[in-house]
């Protein structure tokens, strides 16, 4: 009985994101939270994550639970910044003595982390979803609100004015297919706002997912964007954001790097997938996805949802 209990309390990786590094690899702890540990891959210098909640899954994350299914509290396991670890095919072993098993692990399907096919939307659909997003943002006291992106929404708050200016410039740049303007606009949003992943960075991730969806529209459609334009925009934006003096943190840079490669969090893809359905299923799915995104940071998920809707229809906030 004592041995079984011990085995039950062994942390086990259940699933791996598609971009989680393949063993063998060496890494070190970057930061520790109750439900997450950020690690840095020694070879690439890139960030990846251990998570206890599968709702927050993303391409560079591993979902970890105890063998008996209980949730893991990472800040109780003796991990701290700088602790080293090595991974082989069987386990991730930290030099503090913690061992996390890879036995029975499987990779997430790429379809769960890439822009879904078959998105259909119009201005009215985005307006309706934006109004629903506003309800969630109001309840959370989010600094950024959907209606803040309206060109006629005048607010004395410096953050809101800076954000609206950057977002509207980004929309204009994509409408004109001006790569230089688009990169400049992104630089006005990168790192904008407080937190581990500032609102501007989360917004850009959501916006990226939306414009990738627009690449799948017919070439003669007004909102069509060439896929190479989106890829080059993100490539140049990342080069500037992560230069000698980074404009934002390593977590945000990791998510923007994934966006460049059309990889996004499970929850954000689920939000986009709502636009593969007609009403009322679309709003039901959208609301369900918002509820999950609302658990990401203080408002990170809502900021990403704002970027996604704005990326689909930049004029929608003005009609709300």
Image (cartoon, rainbow, N blue to C red):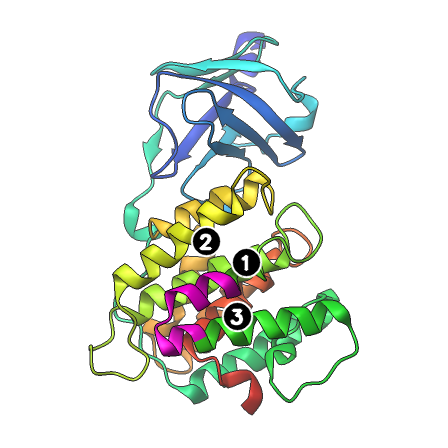
Q: Nearer the viewer, residue 7 or 99?
A: 99
In this rendering, the answer to whether 40 lies above or below 209 is above
185 left or right, relative to 248: left
Q: Which residue is mark 1?
A: 187
311 left or right, relative to 104: right
Tell which tag, 1 or 3, sits nearer the viewer: 1
Q: Nearer the viewer, residue 307 or 110?
A: 307
Q: What secondary structure is the stretch in magenta mostly built from?
A: helix
Query: Tags 2 and 1 in contact by the CB under 8 Å rule?
Result: yes
Q: Quadrant of residue 109?
A: top left
In this rendering, the answer to whether 125 lies above or below 50 is below
Residue under the image location 41 percent in, 26 percent down:
44
Is residue 153 in view? Answer: yes
- Horizontal and vertical percent for residue 47? 50, 33
Callout 2: SS: helix
Q: Which residue is mark 2?
A: 237
Outermost right residue: 156
Residue under the image location 40 percent in, 70 percent down:
274
Quadrant containing the C terminus in the rendered view? bottom right
Answer whether residue 176 is magenta in the image: yes
Q: Which residue is mark 3?
A: 287
Start and end of the magenta stretch?
173-185
In this rendering, the answer to whether 314 lies above or below 51 is below
């Amino acid at each position: 009985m004592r041995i079984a209990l011990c085995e039950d309390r062994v942390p086990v990786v259940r699933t791996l994101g598609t971009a989680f590094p393949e063993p063998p690899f060496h890494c070190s702890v970057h930061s520790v939270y109750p439900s997450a540990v950020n690690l840095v891959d020694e070879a690439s210098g890139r960030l990846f994550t251990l998570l206890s909640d599968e709702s927050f899954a993303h391409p560079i994350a591993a979902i970890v639970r105890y063998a008996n299914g209980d949730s893991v509290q990472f800040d109780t396991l003796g991990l701290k910044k700088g602790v080293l670890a090595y991974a082989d095919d069987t386990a991730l072993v930290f030099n503090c003595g913690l061992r996390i098993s890879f036995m029975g692990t499987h990779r997430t399907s790429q379809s769960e982390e890439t822009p879904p096919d078959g998105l259909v939307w119009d201005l009215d659909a985005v307006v309706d979803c934006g109004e629903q997003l506003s309800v969630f943002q109001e309840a959370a006291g989010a600094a950024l609100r959907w209606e803040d992106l309206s060109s006629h929404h005048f607010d004395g708050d410096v953050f809101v004015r800076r954000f609206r200016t950057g977002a509207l410039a980004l929309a204009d740049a994509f409408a004109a297919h001006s790569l230089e303007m688009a990169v400049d606009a992104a630089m006005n949003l990168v790192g904008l706002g407080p937190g581990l992943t500032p609102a501007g960075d989360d917004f850009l991730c959501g916006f990226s997912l939306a414009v990738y969806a627009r690449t799948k529209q017919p070439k003669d459609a007004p909102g069509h964007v060439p896929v190479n334009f989106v890829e080059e925009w993100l490539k140049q934006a990342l080069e500037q954001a992560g230069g000698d003096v980074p404009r934002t943190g390593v977590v945000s840079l990791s998510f923007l790097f994934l966006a460049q490669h059309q990889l996004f969090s499970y929850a954000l893809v689920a939000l986009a997938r709502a636009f593969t359905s007609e009403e009322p299923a679309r709003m039901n799915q959208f609301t369900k996805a918002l509820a999950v995104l609302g658990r990401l940071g203080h408002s990170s998920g809502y900021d990403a949802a704002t970027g996604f809707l704005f990326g689909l229809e930049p004029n929608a906030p003005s009609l709300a």
